[in-house]
Structures are given as structure tokens and as C-alpha cells.
């Protein structure tokens, strides 16, 4: 009983610490311009596409993020690193865990997560652990293990961690969560470029690309760009029709299959004659 | 050649899907089964989300059945009266199935139930078919006439049902309740497993109802055509999981394959063809059984809330 209470307590403490982290993060972002002042550098980021179109031949994309670092005194100091975080829209998820019951594997336990980024990729100029302190990484959610997924079941911290690990492993395997250390190159301390692969299974929605300028484990400048991932042309039409006009869509599907079947029947009958 | 599937949300090799449809089409042309029992698991194995695989393979079976129904009806191979009763049962079954599907989806056990259904049904039918066809093949080698298939033309419980109708094509005088019930069961399976139900319907009509062999395949295709069309509509309205591009690709392959299959079957001895189908069915059943008992590749699954 006692163990359970302490576990509950730990979970609550973890939640509280997460809340304070979020608050701290918001506070930091708010006073970032003040902190940076005139002596701190400025980021001028850009992306190769602010709109990724999923068309019939879409097999994934290569997103190029590049930009310049402006220094007030014009002289770039040594040891400048850049990390780029690309995040897809967050969604609530139910994660199920299988267990062996009577010889077969069935879904056994489950855990809800309130906000799981549908896509998360981080590219950096050096491995993340050499780049930022764990604290900073946690505050800015840099690195897959630092994502705040907001488990909502109120189960023990251990259990939550287990489900979180399972979820992240699943996302990693499908290529939706990825870390690309050394994918950012910084030239002469003033120009940076990163190329991040976007897999074909990428979910649609509004994405953000956050660029962080890092020096001595500290984030000294940050900038955000929005990227829209959407279906285009015929794909958009089909996906839209399926949700907006389901009856017509269903009838069209039946009609199409009847037509194709009938055409084949008369076609082959002709060919045989 | 890669093509993006707008509903499934992934990019697939179009040629693989067309060939998959073609292989399944050959089977449907040969045996009068829709082939959904192969399409659905293979699509899921390829990475298509289960709901999309089930819904789109139902759409595909509709198209694949058309040429078969036309061909059989020209040869008087469809008992439309029996077909209509089966369709009525099938429609009722698909509505009930839709309700069960949602219930199982909510509790997270849909995948296990689908797997168990596949193992139980395919294992049973595959074994029965393998035994029967093996006997026929062995008899063929020995030069003895094949052992007669014991069909009870009059089962007591079916004969006991009230309101008998005459089904001329099928050569039956039975209560419509029996085929209605049979149709209902296949309708349930269509929704839950994404199969046309031919592999249940054909043996059940032959061995349980005692329908004349001449109209069995045609009537089964007729029922499958309407019930899968209804299922497509149910999925389009509720799960929005019908992928037109996926169904189209499968169709291009399967309508072609069906024509090839109907030619091939005339050159193969029927008992050998049945043996082949039995082996395919058993392979799928064993694969599904292994999938249920082996340590799964991913212990965790995700569902959008």
C-alpha cells in the first residue's frame, strides 16, 4: 500500500515538475528578446519549402533548413552550434500493451497520452548530449527522450515510463521520430544548413521548425518557422470527398468497382471471340 | 512505381498491389471465392492500416465478382431467388457486424478477434477441403472412382423450419430462414474480416443446404457482390476507410486475374484445383496462428483518440 502511495506521489511530483518546466520554458521564451539584448546574435532562418504537398507520387521529402547568424559586432565567436527541431501537430493517443494470455498475445493494459507530436525530428551540428545540458534539453524539448507526452491515466511513474518508451520505440521504427546528429553544418560560424528527411507516412497538418543557436550548452537565440504539410490535387480531392461526402464517395467506390469489373468482363469476352 | 494512397496515408509500390490483386483474382476466377481472405491479411502485412485493408478489399471483391456473376448468370448458374434471400441475410449481418466491430474497436480486442476468426475458420475449412480433395486425388491415381461426397440432402433441423419456399435453380424446397441465417453469418464475417464469405458460403450451400452444384458458385458470387457493396457503403459512412486508389489498383489486377483464372480452371482437374486452394487456405491459417502466438514484433500499438 505504502509503495503504491509513494509511486503516486512520484507521479504527482513528476507532473508538477513538468508543469513548472513548461512555465519556465514559457517564461524563458517571453524574455528571450530581453536576454539576448544587443550583444547577442540573431538568427535569420529559412526553409526550402513552407508547404509540403503530398501528391500521387509522394515518397517522402527532403526538407532543407538554412539561414544566417547575425552578430552585432560582426565577428563570429568560436564554438557555435545549431539544433533544428521539426514538430508535427500534437494529438491525443491511446497506447496499448500486449501480454500473453492463454498462449496468445492480446492487448492487455493501456495508457492515454494527451499530447503526442505526430512527427518529431531533431537535427544538430553535434550529438545532443555534447550540445546542451540535460536541463536545457528538457526545457526546450530537444531530443526524443525529452518530449512531454502528458500521460493522463494517473498510473504509476514506472508504468508511464514503460508505455512512453513503447510509444517512442514505435514512432522511431515508423520513422516518425528521428534524431539526426551531425546533420547540421555550420560554415564560418555564420551560415548553417540542415537537411531533414520527411518520410512518406508523414501525417498532415501544421508543422513548426524551431532553430536554436547554442553556445556553451546555453541557448542564445531561437527562431520558428511554420511548415504546412498537406495533400494536394487528386489526393486532396479524394481524402476530402471521403470525409465530406461519405455517401457519394461510397456510391462512387461501388460504381467504380462495378464499372471496372464489367469492362473487364466484356473486354475479355471480345478478346476471346 | 510508387503511388501515394490518399486514405491509407502511405506510399506503396503500385505494381505489387496490382500483382497481389491479380493473384487473388486468379483464385476467385478458379474457385468462386472473392479472395478477401488473402487480400486483407496481405495488405495488413504490407503496412496498410487494418481498417483501410478491410474496407478496400470489400470494395475490390464487388468488382471482382461482377464478371463472375455475369458469366454464371448467362449459363443459368445463379438462383436469383436463393441469392436474394442470402443478400437479405447478408445485409442484416453486415449491420450487426458493424455494431460488433465498433464495440471490439473500443475495447481494443478487434485485432485478436480477427486473428482468431481467421485461424478457426480457415483452419477448419482448409482441413476439410484438403481431406476431401486428397481422397479424390488418391482415388484418381488408383484408377478407382472418387468416393462419393456424402451430402445429406435433408437435414432434420432445416426441414423443421416453417414456411417452405421452392428454389428452382437450387433444386430445393426449404424454408428461406435457413439461407437467411447463412447469409447473416457471411455478412457478419464480411464486416469483421473483409472477406466476401464465399469460402463459407460455397461449402455451406453444398454440404449443409444441399444446393445443386450447378448454381452454388454463381449464387455465392451474386450474394458476395451485393453484400460487399453494402459493406463498402457502411465503411464509407462510418469508418471513412475506403481507399479508392487502393481499391482501384487491386481491381485492375483482380478483374484481369479472374478472367485468367476462369480459363485455367478448365485445364486443371477439379480435385487438384481444390487441393491447391486447400493448401493456400491452410497456409494463411497457419501464418495467422503463428502471428497470434509468436512474440509480437511490437508489443505496443497506438490508437488515435
Image (tube, coloured by chain):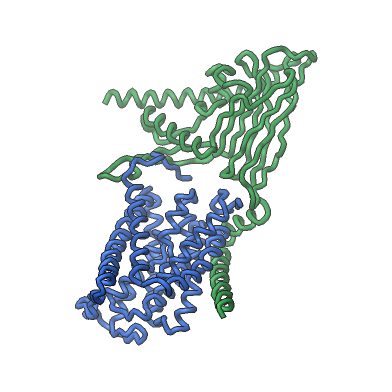
Chain colours: A green, B blue
Instruction: Say which residue appears at 63% left-offset and 38% top-offset.
Output: A207
Instruction: Say which residue appears at 39% left-offset and 75% top-offset.
Output: B217
Compared with A23, B219 (above or below) is below
Compared with A147, B78 (above or below) is below
Q: Nearer the viewer, residue B198 or B27?
A: B27
Where is residue A139 shown, x and y percent of the image? Answer: 55, 23
Q: Is residue B305 visible?
A: no
Q: Quadrant of residue A256?
A: bottom right
Where is residue A82 shown, x and y percent of the image? Answer: 66, 22
Q: Quadrant of residue A71?
A: top right
Task: Please give left or right for residue A32 compared with residue B7 in the image.
Answer: right
Compared with B212, B110 (above or below) is above
Q: Nearer the viewer, residue B97 or B220?
A: B220
Q: Quadrant of residue A96?
A: top left
Q: Is residue A225 visible?
A: yes
Residue that sits furthest to the left in the current view: B156
Q: Nearer the viewer, residue A200 or B7?
A: A200
| Numbered marks: total | 0
Q: Nearer the viewer, residue B61 or A139?
A: B61
Residue that sits furthest to the front in the current view: B142
Instruction: Say which residue appears at 58% left-offset and 43% top-offset.
Output: A202
Placement of the C terminus of chain A among the 4 image quadrants: bottom right
Where is residue B136 shown, x and y percent of the image? Answer: 28, 70
Instruction: Say which residue appears at 57% left-offset and 25% top-offset.
Output: A142
Where is residue B191 shown, x and y percent of the image? Answer: 41, 62
Placement of the N terminus of chain A among the 4 image quadrants: top left
Amino acid at each position: 500500500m505504502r509503495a503504491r502511495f509513494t509511486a503516486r506521489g512520484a507521479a504527482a511530483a513528476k507532473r508538477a515538475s513538468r508543469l513548472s518546466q513548461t512555465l519556465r520554458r514559457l517564461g524563458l521564451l517571453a524574455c528571450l528578446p530581453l536576454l539576448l539584448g544587443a550583444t547577442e546574435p540573431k538568427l535569420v532562418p529559412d526553409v526550402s519549402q513552407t508547404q509540403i504537398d503530398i501528391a500521387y507520387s509522394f515518397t517522402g521529402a527532403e526538407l532543407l533548413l538554412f539561414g544566417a547568424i547575425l552578430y552585432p559586432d560582426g565577428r563570429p565567436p568560436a564554438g557555435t552550434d545549431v539544433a533544428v527541431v521539426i514538430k508535427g501537430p500534437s494529438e491525443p493517443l491511446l497506447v496499448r500493451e500486449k501480454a500473453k494470455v492463454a498462449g496468445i498475445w492480446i492487448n492487455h493494459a493501456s495508457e492515454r497520452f494527451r499530447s503526442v507530436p505526430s512527427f518529431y525530428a531533431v537535427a544538430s551540428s553535434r550529438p545532443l548530449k555534447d550540445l546542451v545540458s540535460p536541463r536545457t534539453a528538457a526545457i526546450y524539448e530537444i531530443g526524443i527522450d525529452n518530449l512531454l507526452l502528458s500521460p493522463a491515466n494517473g498510473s504509476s511513474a514506472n508504468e508511464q515510463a514503460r508505455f512512453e518508451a513503447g510509444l517512442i520505440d514505435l514512432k522511431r521504427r515508423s520513422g516518425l521520430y528521428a534524431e539526426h546528429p551531425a546533420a547540421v553544418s555550420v560554415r564560418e560560424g555564420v551560415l548553417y544548413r540542415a537537411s531533414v528527411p520527411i518520410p512518406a507516412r508523414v501525417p498532415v497538418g501544421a508543422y513548426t521548425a524551431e532553430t536554436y543557436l547554442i553556445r556553451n550548452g546555453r541557448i542564445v537565440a531561437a527562431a520558428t518557422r511554420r511548415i504546412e504539410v498537406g495533400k494536394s490535387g487528386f489526393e486532396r480531392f479524394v481524402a476530402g470527398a471521403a470525409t465530406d461526402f461519405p455517401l457519394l464517395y461510397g456510391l462512387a467506390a461501388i460504381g467504380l468497382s462495378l464499372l471496372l469489373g464489367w469492362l473487364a468482363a466484356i473486354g475479355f469476352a471480345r478478346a476471346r471471340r | 512505381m510508387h503511388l501515394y494512397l490518399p486514405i491509407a496515408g502511405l506510399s506503396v509500390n503500385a505494381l505489387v498491389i496490382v500483382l497481389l490483386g491479380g493473384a487473388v483474382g486468379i483464385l476467385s476466377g478458379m474457385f468462386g471465392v472473392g479472395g478477401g481472405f488473402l487480400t486483407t491479411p496481405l495488405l495488413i502485412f504490407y503496412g496498410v492500416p487494418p481498417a483501410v485493408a478491410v474496407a478496400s478489399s470489400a470494395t475490390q471483391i464487388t468488382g471482382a465478382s461482377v464478371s463472375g456473376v455475369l458469366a454464371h448468370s448467362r449459363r443459368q448458374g445463379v438462383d436469383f431467388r436463393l441469392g436474394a434471400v442470402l443478400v437479405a441475410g447478408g445485409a442484416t449481418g453486415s449491420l450487426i457486424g458493424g455494431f460488433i466491430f465498433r464495440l471490439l474497436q473500443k475495447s481494443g480486442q478487434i485485432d485478436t478477434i480477427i486473428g482468431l476468426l481467421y485461424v478457426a475458420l480457415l483452419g477448419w475449412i482448409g482441413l476439410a477441403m484438403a481431406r476431401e480433395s486428397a481422397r479424390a486425388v488418391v482415388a484418381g491415381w488408383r484408377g478407382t472412382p472418387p468416393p462419393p461426397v456424402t451430402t445429406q440432402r435433408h437435414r432434420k433441423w432445416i426441414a423443421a423450419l416453417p414456411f417452405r419456399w421452392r428454389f428452382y435453380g437450387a433444386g430445393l424446397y426449404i424454408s428461406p430462414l435457413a439461407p437467411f441465417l447463412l447469409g447473416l453469418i457471411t455478412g457478419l464475417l464480411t464486416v469483421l474480416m473483409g472477406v466476401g464469405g464465399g469460402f463459407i458460403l460455397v461449402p455451406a450451400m453444398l454440404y449443409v443446404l444441399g444446393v445443386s452444384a450447378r448454381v452454388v458458385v454463381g449464387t455465392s458470387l451474386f450474394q458476395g457482390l451485393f453484400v460487399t457493396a453494402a459493406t463498402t457503403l457502411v465503411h464509407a459512412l462510418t469508418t471513412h476507410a475506403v481507399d479508392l486508389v487502393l481499391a482501384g489498383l487491386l481491381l485492375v489486377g483482380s478483374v484481369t486475374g479472374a478472367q485468367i483464372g476462369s480459363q485455367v480452371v478448365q485445364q486443371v482437374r477439379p480435385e487438384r484445383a481444390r487441393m491447391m486452394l486447400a493448401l493456400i487456405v491452410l497456409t494463411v491459417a497457419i501464418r495467422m496462428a503463428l502471428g497470434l502466438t509468436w512474440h509480437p514484433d511490437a508489443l505496443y500499438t497506438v490508437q488515435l483518440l
